[in-house]
Structure formats: structure tokens, C-alpha cells
Image (cartoon, helix red, strand yellow):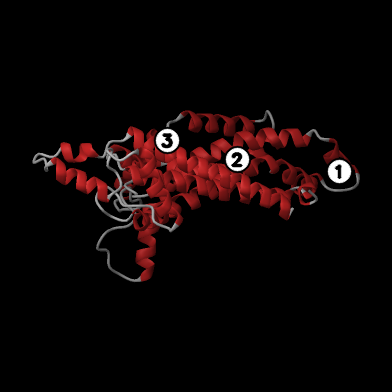
Amino acid sequence: MVGFLLRRFFNYLILILLAACVGYFLAASSLNPRVRFEERSAQPPPAVVDQALYALNLNDKTPIVTRFATWASGVVHGDLGKTVDGDLVVAELGQRVGVSLRLLLLGSVLGGVLGVLAGVVCAVKQYKLTDYSITLISFLLLATPVFLLAVLLKLGGLYVNQTAGATIFYYTGEYTPGLSGGWWRLATNRVQHLILPTLAVVLPSAAFYSRYQRSAMLDVLSSDFLRTAVAKGLRRRQALLWHGLRTALVPMVTFFAYQFGLLLISDAFVEKIFAWHGMGEWFIDSVASSDVNVVAAITLFAAVLLLLAGLVAELAYAVLDPRVRDR
């Protein structure tokens, strides 16, 4: 098992290097940081612009291979370069990752758990009212764009606040600036800010997982080993939980691991609409501002996150499927 994980690690490491190279070359060849200076009302002299771009390793007059070598050398030493505003990318990255994790970690876990439970219920209650109801809701959620769902949740929170005559849900930012009080009040305020954007992550994720879990569970329900377990004296509920669900969860591990890896930068609409300054929002703003170093750094970080997600998936396989541990 250790040898298998090591081989996978080195394979993923090669993919990270390729992703870093491709991400940087695409960003450096398609984005033009010089435009930021040219669009100013009082344009600085060309020599000043060149000097500023040279200092940031963003000058298009330098060969792209040379710029990449300089950037890669910095990455090896933990330096991801500077933004077009002169700030350290590493410092900003640390803050943005924390914001996104607070929003998406809870949302993805809840979405996965609820989706698996909904899929199991649909499979056990196949072609019954429960199955049809959950299926209809799932398809409606999957057909609703994320930005529209976020806006609807925002409007729903506003309606609840107006009806209750008090602020129950906040829909802008992570917390209320300047709020004073004890730790309980501060924690409650953060939870109130967290509910609506978390729902915007949970609902589509749960709908997505429920469809796959239903299909996987239906395959297990018709399997011979489950009938054998019941024939040996296990109650059907015990057989479903100990044998059926464990087997049906194996293919879901990959979906959950890689979906979380992509969520960190793919839920930019949620962060934009609810004013959470995380990785997704930063990526969109960086592309709009032609910030090559930031785009390359986010691409590298996403590749590393997918590597970790892949390793976690392999470990989960070993827990759920004993045959993997024997390899």
C-alpha cells in the first residue's frame, strides 16, 4: 500500500509541474499587465513603466522563458512573486485560502453527507413518492445556475429579515465590521453571515452527490453479496449499512475528493455575490487586472490541492475496500 501511494505521489507531482508550466505560460502569453499603466489618466513615461514591470518580472520585453525561469526559481524558495500592486502573493494567498476554506469546507462536507443520505433513501425507496420528490428537487437544483441560486437565497434571507422584523441572515461579507461584544456575539454574527453562502454551496453539491449515490446504491441492492448477507441472518438494515453502503461509497470517494479540490476556486459566483474575498473572487479579479503572478500562483495551488485530494481518495479507498490495502 505504501509503495502504491508513493507511485501515485510521484505521478501527481509530475502533473503538478505540468500544470504549473502550462498555467504560467498561458497567463503570461494572454494577459498584458502593461495595459494597467496605459489606461491611467496620467500615463507614466515608458521608461518608468518598463522599470516597474521589470521589478515585478512582468515585462513583456523579457522573453517568456526567462520570466518563467525567474518565477519558478522563486517558487522553489517559497516566493510566488508580487501582485501588480506590489504586494506579496504568498501573504495574500494565505488570507484568501482561509476565507475560502471557512466557506467551502463546511459546505462541501454537509453537501456530501446530505447527498449520500438522499441518494441512499432514493435507492431504498425506488419509484416511491420519496424517490420522485428528492429526484425532482435534485434536478431543479442542478438546473439552476449557481449565481441564480445565490441571488435567490439572498432575496429569501432579506424577506425573512423583513418578516421577522430583525436581522436573522446577513448576506454581505464574513462579519459585521466594528461589531463589539463578547465572543458569543461575535461567533453568532459570523454564523449569521455564513448560513446563506453555505447553503449556496450545500444545495447543488447535495443534488449532485444524490444522483450518483442513488445509482451506485441501486447496483449494490441487486448484488449477490447483499442477498447472501441477509440469507446468513443479518437484518436488511444491517446488511445495507455494513455491506451495501460501504461498497456504494467507494466510487463516491473520488467525486467528493476532487469536487472539493475544485470548489476552492470554482465557486467564485458565491464569493462575489456574498462579498466573501476568497480564492474564487481573487482569481476573477486577477484575470481582469492581468495579474500574471497571481493567476499562475492560483493555478499552482489548485494543482497541489487536487494532488492532496487524490491522495486522500486513495487512503479512503484503502479504508472502504480491503482489496486496495493488499496491493
Residue placed most toward the observer, 257 or 203: 257
Lower position in the chain sequence, tag 1 or tag 2: 1
Asked if marks 3 and 2 touch (Cβ < 8 Å), the reply is no
**Callout 1: SS:** helix
Q: Look at label 2 and name its amino acid.
A: Phe
Q: CA distance from mark 3 to mark 2?
A: 19 Å
- Left or right of residue 9: residue 244: right
Label 3 secondary element: helix
Residue displayed at 64% across by 38% down: 119
**Which residue position holds label 3?**
146
Q: Position of residue 271 (x, y in %)?
A: 36, 45
Disc 2 element: helix
What residue did someone put label 1 on? Answer: 230
Whichever of callouts 1 and 3 sits on the residue coming sooner in the sequence is 3
Q: Would you name the residue on which mark 2 appears?
A: 255
The residue that appears at 73% across and 46% down in the rendered structure is: 246
